[in-house]
Amino acid sequence: MGHQGKLPTLELLGKIVEVNGNSGIFVTMNPAGKGYGGRSKLPDNLKQLFRPVAMHPDFELIAEILLFSEQLKTAKSLAQKSVSIFLLAKQLLTL
């Protein structure tokens, strides 16, 4: 740690680096297992350094942005309707 009024420091790859408290490091991974061929689990020693967080996609927002990018003026309405159709299809067609 640095002195009062200075940012804390750490040694990284042989260099002294100031630590910015407004920054973070994130590791994003798909789960290892069935259907995700070729991927491996995060090693335990590295896993201990991170806190797990589950993320859930906002399908309507994703669809709206994709439709807006195609210059559709009714993208918001179309996104809501298309996501509803796909979620209903998923419920009805899933075993």
Image (cartoon, rainbow, N blue to C red):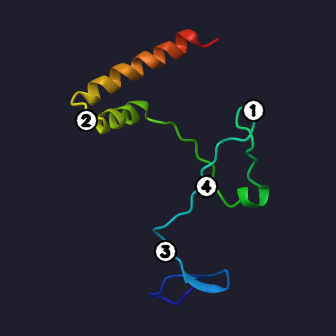
Q: Which mark is residue 5?
A: none
Chain-order first, disc 3 or disc 4: 3
Kindly state the secondary structure of the residue where label 2 is placed. loop
Answer with mark 1 or mark 2, whichever residue precedes in sequence.
1
Going 27% across and 29% down the picture, which residue do you hit?
75
* Identity, as a three-letter code, of the amino acid under mark 3: Asn
Residue at coordinates 46% horizontally, 19% vertically from top-left?
86
Residue corresponding to mark 2: 71
Q: CA distance from mark 1 to mark 2?
A: 38 Å
Mark 3: give few (<14), some (14-19) or many (20+) Cα within 10 Å: few
- The x, y position of residue 83, in whole percent, is 41, 23
Q: Which residue is mark 4?
A: 27
Amino acid type, residue under disc 2 in the picture: Gln
> Marks 2 and 3, Cα distance to the nearest angstrom?
40 Å
Q: Is residue 57 above or below residue 50?
A: above
Question: What secondary structure is found at the residue carrying circle 1?
Answer: loop
Q: Quadrant of residue 44?
A: bottom right
Residue that label 1 marks: 34
Name the front one of labels 3 and 1.
Answer: 1
Element marked by disc 3: loop
Hey, which residue is sitting farthest right in the picture?
44
Residue 85 image offset from top left, x and y in percent: 42, 16
Task: Name which residue type carries label 4.
Answer: Val
- Going by the numbered disc 1, the residue's amino acid type is Lys
What is the CA distance from the residue labelled 3 to the residue labelled 1? Answer: 39 Å
Residue that carries the numbered disc 3 in the rendered image: 20
